[in-house]
Image (cartoon, grey):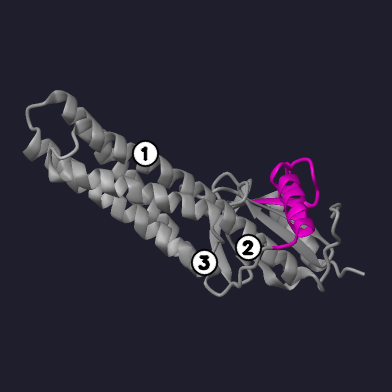
Amino acid sequence: MDYSISINEENLDVLQSTADYKVLRRIFKSGGIASIIFGVIAVAVGAWLGIGYTLFNNLWILFGIFLFGVGIWLIAGMPRPVGLIVLGMLFVLAGMWNIIGAGSAIYILYPGNPIYKIIYQVIFILGMFQIIWGVQTIPRYGRFSRVSIQKPSEENQRWFDQAVNSISGARWEDSIDIIEFKPRGFYENKWKGKLEGKLAIFVQGKVDDVFVVKKEQVKIVDYGNMPRGKSLWAILQIRNRKIKGIFSLESFKRYEMWKSIEAA
């Protein structure tokens, strides 16, 4: 693995800790930006419809200010696993408020105003999107719940950036030590793994998740070829996480060869 820091069993935990920090940092940064945008939208809508005109308008403005402040906190603060629950619940509550508030406005407050109806329909859809985002975020707490998060050194962060960019940008067709796995979930990004010696690095998407692991912490269980015969259904287990999805036959063969070879 051609990175500035040599990966070995002695520094494996330190590098995994770096990966955990960077993954959480990315989640909170994107969530914080979204929270700021949602907050600006809420304040703008409430102010445009008229401050003091209805209770809903005033609450939209107050909730928008709250979202804006939480967004800044998420971006600037130290990432903590419990923040995933806070972020998820915040988006679920924001979504429920937008759905209830917009629905009430459409059918009770402004039933005959076509412009307001369009605005609140957009807010209603935004609320559904926020709930989906929140519901997807909360379960990620389980992945990080037992992780001790500390800010890594600049050297380790540079290693992480180089490693992730190299692996996520690699094509498994062109690199014999790269395997690719497509999770079954509709919204899940692909995993790519770099296999070398007794160690491996797995990266999901850009930085959705990252694992730095020993060979014995990786297991792929084949449970049947797909109809066309070029891919197979499998379960990818990395540490204690199990993911169902699809492997190409070539990726699976590379994995089997890697597992069968004893590194010197």
Magenta stretch: includes residue 178: yes
The percent position of residue 236, horizontal first and vertical second, equals 61, 62
Quadrant where the image shows the C terminus: bottom right
Closer mark to the observer between disc 1 and disc 3: 1
The secondary structure type at the circle numbered 1 is: helix
Which of marks 3 and 1 precedes in the sequence?
Answer: 1
Residue projecting furthest to the right:
264
Q: Is residue 56 left or right of residue 26?
A: left
Image quadrant in which the N terminus is located: bottom right
Kindly indicate the quadrant of the structure image that contains residue 51. Answer: top left
Residue identifier under label 3: 81
Query: Quick check: marks 1 and 3 in contact, CB under 8 Å?
Result: no
The boundaries of the magenta stretch are 152-180
Number of residues whose C-alpha sits closer than 10 Å to that of mark 1, classed few (under 14), some (14–19) or many (20 or more): some
Disc number for residue 40:
1
Label 2 crowd bin: few (<14), some (14–19), many (20+), radius 10 Å: many
The answer to whether marks 2 and 1 mark residues whose Cβ atoms lie closer than 8 Å is no
Secondary structure beneath dot 3 equals loop
Tag 2's secondary structure? helix
Badge 1 amino acid: Val
Q: Residue at x 25, y 35 (%)?
A: 47
